[in-house]
Amino acid sequence: MRLSDLQNKDIINMIDGKKIGNIIDVRLDSNTGHVLGIILETKGFMNKFVRDGSETEIVWSQIKKIGEDVILVETS
């Protein structure tokens, strides 16, 4: 799967069913190449994951399902 494939999917929080943003980047482990998380561009989504108010990182363990049209994540 390519980053461009992921960027076309809606990111949905399983807790409340809301769309939380769009993927703008991924964070990789430089030693292994494994994906550590996805970076979302957000609007008005404020919780403990917000770095500067416009980007949110979802760590890989929070991603529960990658479907054809959506990515389901679980954030508290």
Image (spheres, helix red, strand yellow):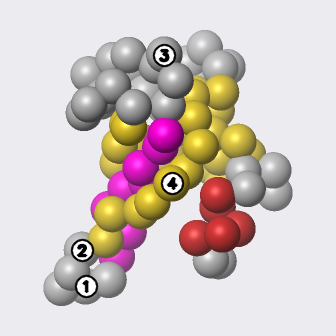
Could you say where residue 6 lies in the image, as x and y percent from the top left? 64, 61
> How far apart are the alpha carbons under marks 3 and 4?
16 Å
SS at circle 2: loop
Sequence-wise first label, 2 or 4: 4
Q: Which residue is mark 2?
A: 29
Camera-nearest residue between 52 and 15: 52
> Hey, what amino acid is under mark 3?
Gly
Q: Nearer the viewer, mark 4 or mark 1?
A: 4
Residue labelled with disc 3: 44
Which residue position is annotated with label 1? 32
Earlier in the chain: of badge 4 and badge 1, it is: 4
Labelled disc at residue 73: none
| Relative height, residue 5 to residue 64 (above, below) | below
- Pointer 1 with pointer 2, Cβ within 8 A: yes
Per the rendered image, the range of residues in magenta is: 34-41
Is residue 63 something that shows in the picture? yes
Q: Are marks 2 and 4 in contact (CB under 8 Å)?
A: no
Look at the picture and state if 20 lies above or below 38.
Answer: above
Quadrant position of the N terminus in the picture: bottom right
What residue sits right under mark 4 in the picture?
Answer: 24
Q: Kindly state the secondary structure of the residue where label 1 is placed.
A: loop
